[in-house]
Image (spheres, grey):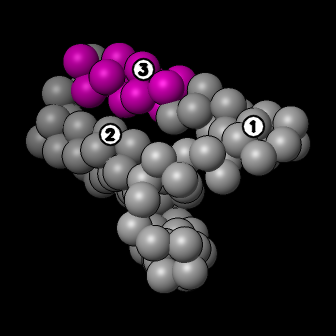
Amino acid sequence: MIYLALAIWGAIHPMYYFVSWFNEHGYDIMAMVDAWHVNAAASGLVWDLTIAAVTLTVFIIAEVAVRRNWIGLIAIPATFCIGVSCGLPLYLFLRSRPVT
C-alpha cells in the first residue's frame, strides 16, 4: 500500500506545479518544454528523468514478458503522461501483488 500511496503522491504533487505554471503562462505545451530547458541545470534534470523513464519502460516490458503480469503495462503511460514519480511506484505496487 506504500507503493500505491507514493504513486498517488507522485501524480498529485508534481501536477500542482504543472497546473500552476499553465495558469500563469497559458496552456502551451511547447512553452513548458522551452521552460524545461531554460538553463543547463534544468536540461540536465529533464534528461535525467527522460533516461529514467525509458529505463523503467524497458524494465516493465522485460518483466511483463517474463511474469505475464499484463496489468503492469499501465505504468508505462503513467510514466510518460504523469511522470516517473507516479509510474515507478505504480509499477512496484502492481508488481507486488501475487501473479496468478
Q: In the rendered image, which residue does mark 1 sit on?
A: 43
**Disc 1 element:** helix
Residues drawn in magenta: 54-65
Q: Majority secondary structure of the magenta segment? A: helix
Measuring 77% from the left and 47% from the top, which residue is drawn there?
A: 38
Residue 51 x/y as whole percent: 61, 26
Front position in the image: 5 or 45: 45
Question: In 3D space, how far apart are the residues under numbered discs 3 and 1 (Cα atoms)?
Answer: 23 Å
Q: In the rendered image, which residue does mark 3 sit on?
A: 58
**Disc 3 element:** helix
Q: In the rendered image, which residue does mark 2 sit on?
A: 76
Residue 99 visible, this orientation: no
Decide if residue 75 is on the left or right side of residue 43. left
Of circles 2 and 1, which is in front?
A: 1
**Disc 2 element:** helix
Of circles 3 and 1, which is in front?
A: 1
Residue 52 x/y as whole percent: 60, 32
- Three-letter code for the amino acid on which mark 1 is drawn: Ser
Mark 3 or mark 1: name the one nearer the start of the chain: 1
Residue 93 visible, this orientation: yes
